[in-house]
Image (cartoon, rainbow, N blue to C red):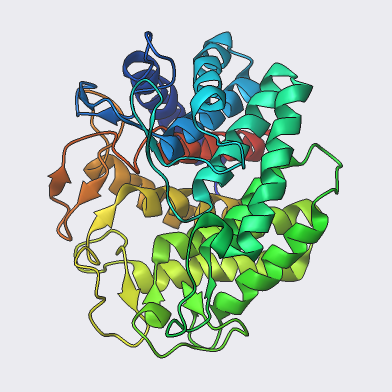
Amino acid sequence: MSTSVSNGRLKQELNRISKDLHESVLTFWLRYSPDQDYGGYFNNLDRDGAVWDTRKHVWLQARQVWMMSAVYNTTKDSRYLEAATPGVEFLRRHARTTDNRVYFCLTREGKPVYMQRKIFSECFYVMALAEYARASASDEIRSEARKVFESVLKFRDDPTLVGRPVYEGVPPASSLAIPMILLNLVDILHEPGESTYSHIEEWCVEQIKLHVKPELKLVLEHVAPDGSLMETPEGRIVNPGHAIEAGWFLLDYARRIDNAELKKLGINIIDWSFDSGWDDEFEGLYYFLDREGYSPPALEWNMKLWWPHCEAMIGFLMAYQTSGDARHFERFVQVLNYCHENFADPEHGEWFGYLDRHGKLTHRFKGGAYKGCFHVPRALWRCEGMLRELLSQ
């Protein structure tokens, strides 16, 4: 184990993280995203905060409610509860159907535009309501969150309920996205000391393990239901950012239940995924890789996206907090430096989201259908909290 990091360095990085979070990132969303006329948020924002599309994507609406509620729950700053309230009201008025499906995209006024044949909009809806219920002490909203979560579990077990047909030519597969998001979601749903959904957490852990291949030092996006390898391009996909996120979700859970074996696995996942995913020539994490070294079918495979780097920041700082190994702290700083040099926008605030392999900006917007008030502030907020804990120890 390497020597622990000095308090001076911890304070230095805490100051940098806190300044970015509170003076740049959260300020950007508080200033530009609220829709004062129809509620909810403008999530399609250009570099300077200008609205380039008034449609509202429910993933981002819900994630912003969660983010504002979570910051309120740790700071008790009323600005964040005030920012979360019109978002949760908009979601409850417009996003959910009578059978607990949740739309993916709405008009500015809240009319449905598009619904995915997936469960992620429902998951983020539950996440938003659960955290807001904690912030507002609303038993009604907490009850609604749990009611929709029960439907999520049914949709997980039977994809035809979300309109996804099962064709005979499609091989059965396990997707990493499902257990990892449910593991994190249960953590948000649970109150301190509660164990209502512990059986779901245990299922998630076992499913995530199926995707971890220690002999390859890789985590695969898709495997057969028994965990065996799939000899298809989909079965060879490695998403370093997703794998790191799964690693810190698992590590976070292992720390809560104090399971040494799972802690080690979570840290290994973070290390392996970074080792395989980091571009040694131009820096940054690749978006996709192929486990056999073929060219991934996705044309954007070698782009550098904001969110994998956000997950790596959380993952490595959590690994350092758990292990005390300064190597993990140095990797946290390595990723943070890359982000500030390439994604952060000192002129208008917040971070850009999309770079080419060489680090050149490809899209100037700060918010779109998938990028909003979530990955960047979540990473900074989680890292701020961990750095404060480290200093208090």
Check the picture and name the quadrant holding the N terminus: bottom right
Q: Residue at 53% across / 67% down in the picture?
A: 176
- 21 above or below 103? above
Image coords of residue 227 (percent x, y): 59, 83
Image coords of residue 267 (percent x, y): 59, 65
Residue 246 is at least partly visible in this image: yes
- 148 above or below 42? below
Left or right, 284 with respect to 272, comes to left
Count of number-bearing discs: 0
Left or right, 232 with respect to 242, comes to left
Q: Could you say which is closer to the camera, residue 231 or residue 352?
A: 231
Q: Residue at 49% across / 27% down in the picture?
A: 94
- 289 above or below 70? below
Image coords of residue 118 (percent x, y): 49, 55
Q: Could you say which is closer to the camera, residue 215 or residue 220?
A: 220
Residue 220 is at least partly visible in this image: no
Image coords of residue 359 (percent x, y): 17, 53
Q: Residue at 62% across / 57% down in the picture?
A: 155
Q: Could you say which is closer to the camera, residue 68 or residue 235?
A: 235
Q: Residue at 72% across / 39% down in the picture?
A: 147
- 313 above or below 270? above
Q: Where, by quadrant of the figure, is residue 299 drawn?
A: bottom left
Check the picture and name the quadrant holding the C terminus: top right
